[in-house]
Image (spheres, grey):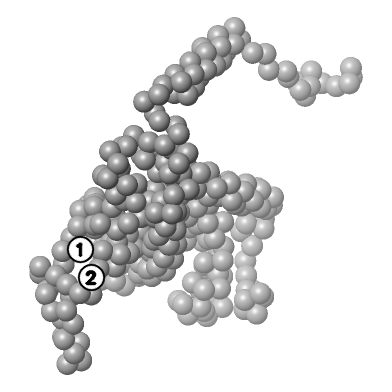
């Protein structure tokens, strides 16, 4: 160890007096806040404990999870289609996808949800194949919620997926072109598999955001988690405790979703850093090998 070059020796980081002071202040503030919250009778922690596992709250939680899963799956599929369209060399197709993405990212989700809930005001009836459909009966609050969340999420997923496509090396695409691959085959066998390390971690963030975003559908009367809490405190006038119950469930589910999301980020970060430079720019020469 004594013969080691001083420049290569590990350096021990010394904590400054300012850092110790900052930690002391943070701890004191945290303890003070904890004592204040736990001893303040106005928080009504007994009411929070009573309703935390209430049947209506749990049903609302299940519906929130359902809306998250369905909207994310449909939004991701539609986002993939939009990303492919946006990457198309055919300008009208790329422009159409661009207009969609700009519109749905540029308008508030809440406005979109209310619009779809009231779409029957514009089109009260639809005729498909000679069959008349009552739009007012078709667009229920849950249907409007799924449609609104899906269409909005698709715009964001399209940009995430398109960003993943852009991360694929130009040499890979040129090699696929030289092998005579069609556009769809190139997308399916070359671009999408190699774009996944960039797409999956960002998608995890979108799932967490979607779970919290479902609270907006309470304005449509959908009995998800927040609406379930609102219905209870509208009867009991215990507003703060019920809002705490809803917040705690949002926090618990967010933490549960954050763990696998962080593991995915670490996994793909490690796999990307382990690739040697030459491997990142490898030229594909075997069509069968690409499919494996």
- The quarter of the picture where the N terminus appears is top right
Front in this rendered view, residue 24 or 151 = 24
What's the distance in space between the residues labelled 2 and 1, CA to CA? Answer: 7 Å
Confirm whether residue 41 shows in the render: yes
Question: If the image is split into quadrants, where does the C terminus sit?
Answer: bottom right
Q: Residue 76 placed where, x, y %?
A: 42, 64
Outermost bottom residue:
130
Q: Residues within 10 Å of mark 2 (few under 14, many from 20)?
A: some
x and y percentages locating residue 136 in the rendered image: 17, 72
Disc 2, disc 1: CB below 8 Å? yes
How crowded is the residue under tag 1: few (<14 C-alpha within 10 Å), some, or many (20+)?
A: many
Please give the name of the residue rendered at 62% of the width and 66% of the height, measured from the top-left corner.
Answer: 283
> Image point 62% across, 48% down: which residue?
263
Q: Is residue 34 above or below residue 126?
A: above
Q: Which residue is mark 1?
A: 117
Secondary structure of the residue carrying numbered label 1: helix
* Image coords of residue 114 (percent x, y): 20, 57
Taking depth in this image into account, of 249 and 23 the one nearest to the observer is 249
Residue at 73% across, 19% down: 11
Q: Is residue 139 left or right of residue 282?
A: left
- Vertical position of residue 120 compared to residue 20: above or below: below
Horizontal side of 103 relative to 6 (left or right) equals: left
Residue 65 image label: none
Q: Position of residue 202 (x, y in %)?
A: 48, 51
Instruction: Please identify the quarter of the rendering in which residue 287 is found.
Output: bottom right
Name the element at disc 2: loop
Q: Which residue is mark 2?
A: 139
């Amino acid at each position: 160890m004594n013969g080691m070059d001083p420049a290569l020796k590990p350096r021990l980081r010394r904590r400054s007096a300012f850092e110790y002071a900052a930690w002391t202040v943070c701890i004191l503030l945290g303890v003070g806040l904890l004592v204040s919250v736990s001893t303040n009778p106005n928080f009504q922690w007994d009411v929070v404990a009573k309703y935390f596992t209430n049947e209506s709250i749990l049903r609302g939680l299940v519906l929130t999870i359902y809306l998250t899963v369905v909207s994310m799956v449909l939004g991701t599929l539609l986002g993939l289609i939009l990303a492919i369209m946006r990457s198309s060399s055919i300008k009208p197709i790329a422009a159409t996808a661009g207009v969609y993405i700009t519109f749905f990212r540029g308008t508030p989700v809440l406005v979109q949800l209310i619009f779809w809930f009231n779409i029957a005001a514009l089109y009260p009836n639809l005729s498909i194949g000679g069959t008349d459909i009552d739009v007012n009966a078709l667009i229920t609050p849950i249907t409007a919620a799924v449609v609104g969340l899906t269409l909005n999420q698709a715009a964001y997923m399209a940009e995430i997926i398109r960003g993943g496509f852009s991360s694929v090396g130009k040499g890979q695409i040129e090699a696929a072109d030289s092998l005579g691959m069609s556009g769809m085959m190139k997308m399916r066998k070359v671009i999408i598999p190699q774009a996944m390390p960039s797409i999956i971690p960002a998608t995890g963030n979108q799932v967490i955001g979607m779970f919290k975003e479902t609270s907006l559908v309470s304005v449509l009367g959908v009995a998800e988690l927040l609406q379930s809490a609102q219905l209870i405190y509208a009867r009991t006038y215990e507003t703060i405790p019920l809002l705490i119950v809803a917040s705690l469930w949002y926090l618990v589910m967010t933490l549960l979703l954050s763990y696998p999301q962080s593991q995915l980020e670490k996994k793909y970060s490690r796999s990307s850093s382990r690739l040697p430079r030459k491997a990142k720019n490898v030229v594909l020469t075997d069509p069968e090998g690409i499919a494996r």
